[in-house]
Image (spheres, rainbow, N blue to C red):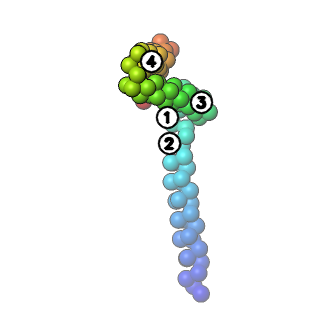
């Protein structure tokens, strides 16, 4: 019977430790990086979703271009230039450090 309180104390300490680890991981994943580019999580999510969608569309256009060279001649490079302009140059212009 004497071991019961010690077991509860150890379980509580383990739970608190796990909670701290979870919160650290949560902060790292959802808060630190978006903050490093002056965005909230939602702003960063929307921006990344927009970038990803444009990259997928450009990638499909490149594959079509591979099959039919007369189509989408500059779509891939145009998309890369536009995304670079939006991500890197605009951040530098606004005093941010670029890509993290």
Instruction: Looking at this view, name the residue that lies furthest to the right.
Output: 42
Instruction: Single out the mark in the foreground, 4 or 2.
Output: 4
Horizontal and vertical percent position of residue 60: 46, 28
Instruction: Looking at this view, name the residue that lies furthest to the top.
Output: 93
Instruction: Single out the mark in the foreground, 1 or 3.
Output: 3
Horizontal and vertical percent position of residue 92: 45, 16
Which is nearer the N-term, disc 3 or disc 4? 3
Instruction: Single out the mark in the foreground, 2 or 3.
Output: 3
Calculate the distance from the C-alpha at mark 2 to the C-alpha at mark 3: 18 Å
Q: Quadrant of the N terminus?
A: bottom right
Label at residue 28: 2
Element at badge 2? helix
69 sits left or right of 20 in the view: left
Calculate the distance from the C-alpha at mark 1 to the C-alpha at mark 3: 14 Å
Which is nearer the N-term, disc 2 or disc 3? 2
Q: Residues within 10 Å of mark 1 (few under 14, many from 20)?
A: some
Calculate the distance from the C-alpha at mark 1 to the C-alpha at mark 2: 7 Å
Which is nearer the N-term, disc 1 or disc 2? 2
Element at badge 1? helix
Element at badge 3? helix
């Amino acid at each position: 019977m004497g071991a019961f309180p010690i077991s509860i104390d150890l379980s509580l300490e383990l739970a608190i430790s796990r909670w701290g680890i979870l919160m650290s991981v949560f902060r790292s994943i959802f808060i630190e990086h978006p903050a490093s580019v002056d965005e909230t999580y939602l702003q960063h999510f929307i921006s990344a979703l927009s970038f990803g969608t444009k990259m997928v569309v450009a990638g499909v256009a490149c594959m079509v271009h591979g099959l039919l060279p007369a189509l989408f001649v500059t779509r891939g490079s145009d998309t890369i230039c536009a995304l670079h302009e939006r991500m890197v140059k605009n951040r530098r212009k606004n005093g941010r450090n670029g890509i993290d």
